[in-house]
Amino acid sequence: MQPEPVHHRVISWYQDHARDLPWRSEDCTPWGVLVSEVMLQQTPVARVLPRWEEWLRRWPDPQSTAEAPSAEILTVWDRLGYPRRALRLQQAAAAIVERHNGEVPSTREELRALPGIGEYTAAAVACFAFGAPEVVVDTNIRRVHARVFAGDALPGKTYTAAQRRLAHRVFPDPELDDGQFASAWNIAVMELGALVCTARPPKCEQCPLAELCAWRLAGSPPPSEQQRGQAQAWAGTDRQVRGALMAALRQEGPTEREDLLAGLALPSADLDQRVRCLESLLSDGLAEQRGVQVALPGVL
DNA sequence: AAATCGGGGTG
DNA sequence: CACCCAGATTT
């Protein structure tokens, strides 16, 4: 759409209030941006920062990442969560070496074809690392759009087709400013969602859009039951058991299968669940079994 | 469209 | 203790 007050207000607000994050630095490489985006998938900025610093210090480019032992990749990943992301990030590095001569590709389509790079991350890297005017939509942006334009308290758990259409409809026209204005819109709305238009108690008194926010103008109605995501319990789940197994493999190194299964400090997990979870880790390539030993992958 | 996949910080 | 966090992949 044509530039409107909503666009100018958000971008101006960003220029005054943006956090100083290392992957936003002028001298951050596209690889640094890509690593940050993968680490930030479902993981807060504060927990990513130290892991990102160490990763880039050890593996500053796709080539070195592709050559590293997977066991080291998973150890540096530490407890960031969803360790399959770490494995896919290494697979993406290998694909970049093979298909793109070791240089992070700059188009949304090429990025989307890499392992672990979905709709959001492909658009984010193309925009933040290369300045491409792609429509970026993350959980922060979905929430801002839901409130400001749709008048809803929360966007709901799943990214719907209607929400995708809305994001495109309110995106500034890239033809106008060679895309400079359009690409600035993405990071500005995202930061507004992260700092002001937050999930719980939003700081509307600090918001540059408060006067024109549809949700606020409607009286800030509370979220419906449908909009409130039902958080699945954590204790007793396979995810907890898988996480405990991975933590043990990181800390203890190669371990006899029977000792690994018996040593888990999770009394609630019966043997069937422990075996099922270990088998799933082996199947995912997050662990390897060699004889009676189980270990992180890639170490001979 | 829904399920699965970690882990920790926070109101 | 429920809820949230710069999602991707599979079914």
Image (spheres, coloured by chain):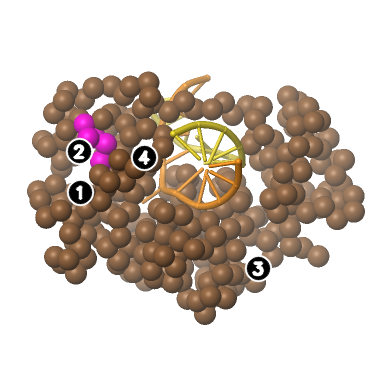
Chain colours: A brown, B yellow, C orange
Mark 3 sits on what residue?
A: A68
**Mark nearer the viewer, 2 or 4:** 4
**Mark nearer the viewer, 2 or 3:** 2
In the displayed structure, would residue A270 be above or below residue A35? above
Q: Are marks 3 and 1 on the same chain?
A: yes
Whether residue A227 can be seen here: yes
Mark 1 sits on what residue?
A: A170
Q: Are marks 1 and 2 in contact (CB under 8 Å)?
A: yes
Residue visible at 49% across and 27% down? Answer: A231
Within the image, what quadrant is residue A195 found in?
Answer: top left
State how far apart marks 4 and 3 are (Cα): 38 Å
Mark 2 sits on what residue?
A: A149
Range shown magenta: A144-151
Q: Are marks 4 and 3 on the same chain?
A: yes
| Residue at mark 3: chain | A
The residue lying toward the viewer, choosing from A10 and A104, is A104
| Residue at mark 4: chain | A
Secondary structure of the residue carrying tag 3 is: loop
Magenta portion: prevailing SS class: helix
| Residue type at numbered disc 4 | Thr
Secondary structure of the residue carrying tag 1 is: helix
Secondary structure of the residue carrying tag 2 is: helix
Mark toward the start of the polypeptide (2 vs 3): 3
State how far apart marks 2 and 4 are (Cα): 15 Å
Mark 4 sits on what residue?
A: A160
Which corner quadrant holds the C terminus of chain A?
bottom right
- Left/right of residue A79 with respect to residue A250 in the rendered view: left
| Residue type at numbered disc 3 | Ala
Mark toward the start of the polypeptide (4 vs 1): 4
| Residue at mark 2: chain | A
